[in-house]
Amino acid sequence: MKHYCPYCNSEQEYYIDKRIFKEYKGVDVNVEENVPICKKCKNELIINNIEDENLKRIYSKYREVKNIITPSEIKDLRARYDISQRELTAILDFGKMTINRYENGSLPSKSQSDYLKLISKEKNEFFNKVKEAYYTNRISQKTFSKIENIINKQSVHDDNYELKLYIENELKTSPNIFNGFKVLDLEKLQNLISYIASKTKLYLTSLNKYLWFIDMISYNQRAISITGLTYVHEQYGPVIINRKYEEISKLDEKYKREDKENNDGSIQSVITSNGNYDLSSFNDKEIKIIDYVISLLSNKSVKAISNLSHKELGWKNTERFEKISFEYADNLKILK
């Protein structure tokens, strides 16, 4: 590999020195960075594409630690209301290229990030800002009407809208070792749950184990999970963090949750498929993994499924309520 060395004043071979970048803006990030070194003079070189990759890793860790909104979350916000970068910039009254820079990886301030997260989560807060932008002539009648129509349709046709926003806000994190380096795709998750429920009697208590085994096997075979969920150690096995399976089970577009009282007064929750799942977003490898887990667990009792999860190192080597790293996917008992 060669690059121009300003010290040698010529093209020179270089090598990569791996270092730990410890702190960014007062935050401990401890991110590995690649530093190109001229083989001849031993001085550091600045190579744009290498520097860009270093910054991406630093920004990603900083976002995670400080809970800063990600470029994909801003794009999702725009897509939800079918608006351009220019329109969102005008609505928020930000600088001309602000949204463009944020979507291309620049870091917003904490206050701007918090506000972007707020309007992404709170539909009414966003629409109040839209109305303000319209009344002050920052956006056109056409843009205002477009957004108003979308919000009205969401309110009428999507009873799950606010619940979805809440779940995504609680569970969607940047790729890391605890979500299998996958950003949560809630639509895909709903289709997956509906598909599982169409193949077997799916109890709510077992849902966590189905999803965990599917994600773990996916990470074992593909180095990425399918759902993007984070799991923690609980008494009866791995569970979606903060028990958000309760909220997820109440989304009723693709499946229904039925709570039945047993003779002893306990409640047993069963999820049944609406039969309208869509597997088009799953590739052949993912479907093969899902079908494998269903075939393995579908004839087992809730207790037997729980016992299977207890044999896995991911559960055995963690404490109660501790996040379960996908590193444990390297040695899965269920695959043996």
Image (cartoon, rainbow, N blue to C red):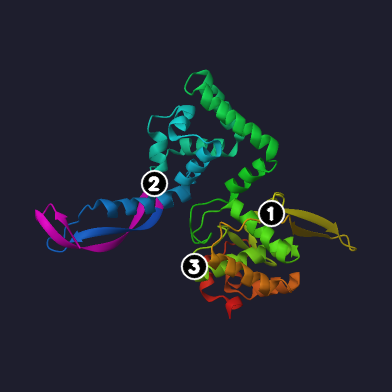
Can you identify the residue that label 2 sits on?
26
- Magenta stretch, overall SS: strand
What quarter of the picture does the C terminus occupy?
Answer: bottom right
Q: What is the number of the mark on residue 276?
A: 1
Residue nearer the viewer, 204 or 239: 204
Mark 3 residue element: helix
In the image, 180: left or right of 197? left
Identify whether 254 is placed above or below 16: above
Between the residue at mark 1 and the residue at mark 2, the CA separation in whole angstroms equals 49 Å
Residue range (magenta) = 1-28
Q: What is the number of the mark on residue 222?
A: 3
Residue at 43 percent of width and 38 percent of height: 109
- Give the x, y percent position of residue 25: 37, 45
Identify whether 105 is placed above or below 31: above
Q: Amino acid at mark 2?
A: Gly
Residue at 20 percent of width and 63 percent of height: 1
Mark 1 residue element: loop
**Lower position in the chain sequence, tag 2 or tag 3:** 2
